[in-house]
Amino acid sequence: MTLSDLNVSWDAGIHAILGAPKDGGPLLLSMLAGAERPRKGQIRVLKGNPLERSVRSRIAFVPLDPVLPDALRVHEIVMLAQRFRGDARGSAVDGLAALGIETLAPRPARTLGPAEGRAVLLAEALASPSVRVLLIEEPAVCLEPRAASHLGGSLREFARDGRAVILVTSSARDADALADDTWLLRAGILSGPCPPLMSLARGPSSTGASFRLAVSDARALTAALARETDVETMAYDEGGLRVNGPNPVALAEALGRTIAATQVVVFDLRIERSDASPPPVRPREAALGPDRSRWEVP
């Protein structure tokens, strides 16, 4: 896996990277956490090198498959993390209570399932005053149910204090529910930010929905959208490709499917009112042309 042409800067807030694992999201988090070294280029976290201890102690990484020291109990793990980070010694139970998992405190780590282990790592990070950057792989996957119910509110409270959360997910719904902005990662190429596709998921609308996109290969995307029954019309103008449909949810899902299938790079994506669109063309006419043998897109 190679991450190429990566030039991005994140500030405080919650940022989602949307893509499949093979696209490189877990690798990017590992490099930000200092667990992997880039072959070229430079990574700076909190104005320093994530390989340095003074920086790493302020970064928390919650991978999909956590590893905890089997010989320790949960409250001992939290206390060890406090010592490593230089935090004032506090109650481990109080830290776990932020995600509603304080009953796990006396449990040996070897008795925890993966979902419980992830919840412990996440609770420790959220409770630490030293952590300024929180990295999470698939935040809503394999997470203890009590912790999952507190997740959204706890992340927003964490980010309100001028801290940053960077999460990698393959779910557009999770990105929309948790993040302030979303970046698309496809085959190691990152683009964005763009509004989450599912931000229109409020049910059918009488006026329909309209998305305007600027992409690397509009022809390939238009051909794929032409096969989607939830796409009513498409049109080109100086602002890019405009896609309209009667149902906001169905249209967002159709766009998500076709973007993933064609692997086009999305440079810009905007949500607009469908009643302000230019005169549209039917998608199958746009894709095939009148003689059904070649492209004719106005």
Image (cartoon, rainbow, N blue to C red):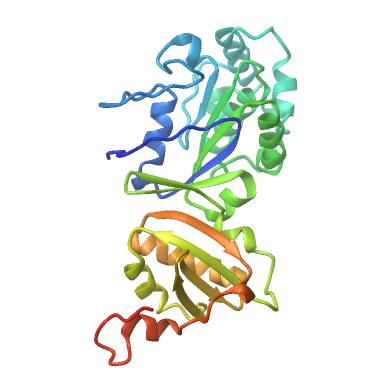
Residue 29 in percent (x, y) is at 43, 32
The quarter of the displayed image where residue 159 is located: top right
Side of 261 where 110 appears, left or right: right
Q: Residue at x 52, y 33 (%)?
A: 10
Closer-to-camera residue (133/192)? 192
Image quadrant where one finds the N terminus: top left
Side of 175 where 50 appears, left or right: left
Residue 137 in percent (x, y) is at 49, 38
Question: Is 270 located above or below residue 43 in the figure?
Answer: below
Q: Residue at x 70, y 31 (%)?
A: 160
Q: Residue at x 41, y 66 (%)?
A: 258
Closer-to-camera residue (164/107)? 164
Residue 209 in percent (x, y) is at 61, 71
Q: Residue furthest front?
A: 238
Image quadrant where one finds the C terminus: bottom left
Side of 97 where 117 appears, left or right: left
Closer-to-camera residue (117/106)? 117
Residue 27 in percent (x, y) is at 37, 35
Q: Residue at x 58, y 41 (%)?
A: 143
The quarter of the displayed image where residue 284 is located: bottom left
| Residue 245 in view, yes or no | yes
